[in-house]
């Protein structure tokens, strides 16, 4: 049997009949900021704007080599994997049935339909992905189809390793350091298995879905009790069994958790400074640069920007979360005396760079004091220290609820 390097290179060569290699671009801004020679592997520029195309291609190629061209392929996905499978069904001229949650945004459903055309059928099943997955697997077994797993499959991992093949060819060898986004672990496992010990790795998960860290600590894959779905391309409750076999001996100190709100800061910076559109999962590797800054100075570093399927309807939420993380936007509840001039007194405490972004009077009955929900945007986080000092001097009672998860969910 061929070794992994040979199979990964064969997969990469075969992909060239479908799409060109994605660029490996040196980023001047990030190189200067972090004192290293930093490159972005632009998987966001693949035909489906993510690396998922690679694993789907390789898994389907292997099946079709061994069976009839009329093979039925089935998958469950709410995003990039669905689009990759749809694209490859169209390419190979085979039939695919793609199960997506009922709650999937129409934009993602439409893109999947566009990539697959007449070759795919989309079925919307279940409010939650687990329900969707169960139904997809039931259907696949009943119809005798081939289930295309998004990451927990050796052929998929082999296909994702083509990212490392391209990096090595484009750089003329292995880089010193690779920063890898991790969801189910397929991409990370493929790159690690290809480069081996020649490279130092940093693995980055969203803080609300640290399934790799949990598995490394436990010595086996575990299912997280709760997952924050904001980083939808990497919000996985359980690392794949096959990827974990490759990653189980990594050092836990090389696994990082990226706060969801900080990822928003990175997404906006990449958009505003570089003109690069990244989805939350696609920004993970770049976001972790601040965590590994001391390790990468003077090194050749590659960040894999794994996807750019970003729905711009989410941009206001991303901006909001970025401002709150950066400390330039806060929400607080102000206890306002019910007398003439009280509101004017409050307004006089605002600084020249403080802007009211939200003002909602919460008083429900006739009382001497009323509660007001205030949202303030400013240019520097230090301005809030000055504002709160002035509020204290003026005798106002207030409560900062910016980071109060429960109150923010109901009021903001």
Image (spheres, rainbow, N blue to C red):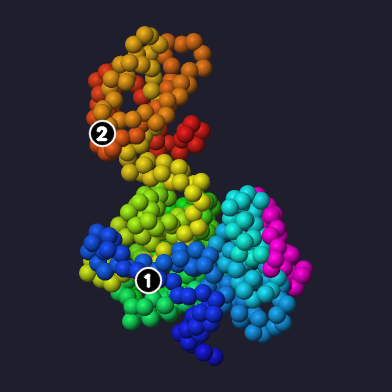
Residue that label 2 marks: 383
If you read the primary sequence from the N terminus, does the residue marked by circle 2 or circle 1 appear first? Answer: 1
Q: Is residue 92 above or below residue 355?
A: below
Give the structural element (helix, strand or loop) at label 1.
strand
Give the vertical position of 268 relative to 60 (above or below).
Answer: above
Characterize the local packing of mark 2: few (<14), some (14-19) or many (20 or more) Cα atoms within 10 angstroms: some
Residue placed furthest toward the bottom: 1
Identity of the residue drawn at 43% across and 79% down = 165
Q: Residue 145: say if magenta.
A: yes
Of the two numbered discs 2 and 1 in the rendering, the one whose residue sits closer to the viewer: 1
- In the rendered image, residue 30, in percent from the top left (x then y), is placed at 28, 61
Q: Which dot marks residue 299?
A: none
Q: Residue at x 70, y 66 (%)?
A: 118
Image spot of residue 190 (x, y percent): 47, 75
Task: Pick the quarter of the image with the N terminus.
Answer: bottom right
The answer for how far apart the CA atoms under marks 2 and 1 are is 41 Å
Q: Which residues are magenta?
A: 118-146
Q: Is residue 259 placed above or below 22 in the rendered structure?
A: above
Categorize mark 1 by other alpha carbons within 10 Å: few (<14), some (14-19), many (20+).
some
Nearest the viewer among 65 and 192 is 65
In front here: 7 or 88? 88
Residue 205 in view here: no
Expressed as whole percent of the image width and height from the top left, the position of residue 399 reads 37, 28
Image disc number at residue 24: 1
Question: Is residue 60 at all visible to an observer of this figure?
Answer: yes
Magenta stretch holds residue 171: no
Residue at image coords 31%, 68%: 26
Query: Where is 218 relative to 320, above or below?
Result: below
Name which quarter of the figure residue 59 lies in: bottom right
Task: State the image coordinates of residue 245 (x, y, percent, origin top left).
Answer: 49, 74
Q: Secondary structure at mark 2?
A: helix
Left or right: 122 with respect to 258? right
């Amino acid at each position: 049997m061929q070794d992994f390097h040979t199979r990964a290179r064969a997969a990469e060569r075969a992909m060239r009949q479908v799409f060109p290699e994605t660029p490996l671009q040196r980023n001047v801004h990030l190189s200067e900021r972090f004192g290293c020679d930093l490159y972005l592997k632009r998987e966001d520029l693949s035909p489906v704007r993510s690396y998922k195309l690679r694993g789907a291609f390789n898994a389907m190629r292997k099946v079709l080599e061994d069976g009839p061209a009329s093979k039925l392929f089935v998958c469950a996905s709410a995003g990039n994997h669905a689009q990759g499978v749809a694209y490859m069904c169209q390419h190979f001229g085979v039939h695919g049935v793609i199960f997506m949650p009922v709650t999937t945004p129409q934009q993602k459903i439409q893109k999947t339909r566009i990539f697959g055309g007449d070759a795919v059928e989309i079925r919307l099943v279940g409010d939650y992905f687990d329900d969707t997955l169960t139904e997809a697997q039931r259907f696949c077994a009943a119809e005798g189809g081939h289930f295309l797993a998004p990451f927990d499959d050796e052929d998929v991992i082999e296909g994702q390793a083509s990212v490392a093949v391209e990096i090595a060819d484009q750089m003329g060898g292995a880089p010193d350091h690779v920063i890898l986004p991790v969801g189910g672990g397929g991409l990370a496992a493929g790159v690690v298995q290809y480069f081996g010990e020649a490279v130092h790795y940093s693995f980055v998960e969203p803080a609300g879905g640290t399934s790799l860290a949990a598995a490394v600590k436990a010595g086996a894959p575990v299912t997280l009790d709760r997952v924050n779905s904001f980083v939808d391309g990497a919000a996985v409750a359980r690392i794949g069994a096959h990827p974990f076999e490759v990653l189980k001996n990594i050092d836990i100190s090389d696994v990082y958790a990226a706060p969801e709100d900080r990822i928003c800061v990175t997404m906006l910076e990449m958009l505003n400074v570089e003109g690069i559109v990244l989805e939350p999962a696609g920004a993970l590797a770049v976001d972790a640069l601040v965590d590994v800054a001391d390790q990468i100075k003077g090194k050749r570093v590659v960040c894999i920007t794994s996807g750019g399927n970003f729905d711009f309807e989410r941009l206001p939420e991303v901006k909001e979360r970025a401002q709150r993380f950066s400390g330039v936007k806060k929400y607080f509840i102000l206890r306002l005396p019910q007398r003439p001039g009280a509101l004017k007194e409050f307004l006089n405490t605002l600084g020249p760079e403080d802007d009211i972004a939200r003002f909602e009077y919460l008083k429900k009955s006739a009382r001497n004091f009323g509660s007001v929900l205030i949202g303030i945007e400013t240019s520097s986080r230090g301005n809030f220290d000055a504002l709160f000092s002035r509020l204290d001097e003026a005798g106002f009672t207030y409560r900062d609820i910016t980071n109060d998860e429960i109150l923010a969910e109901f009021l903001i």
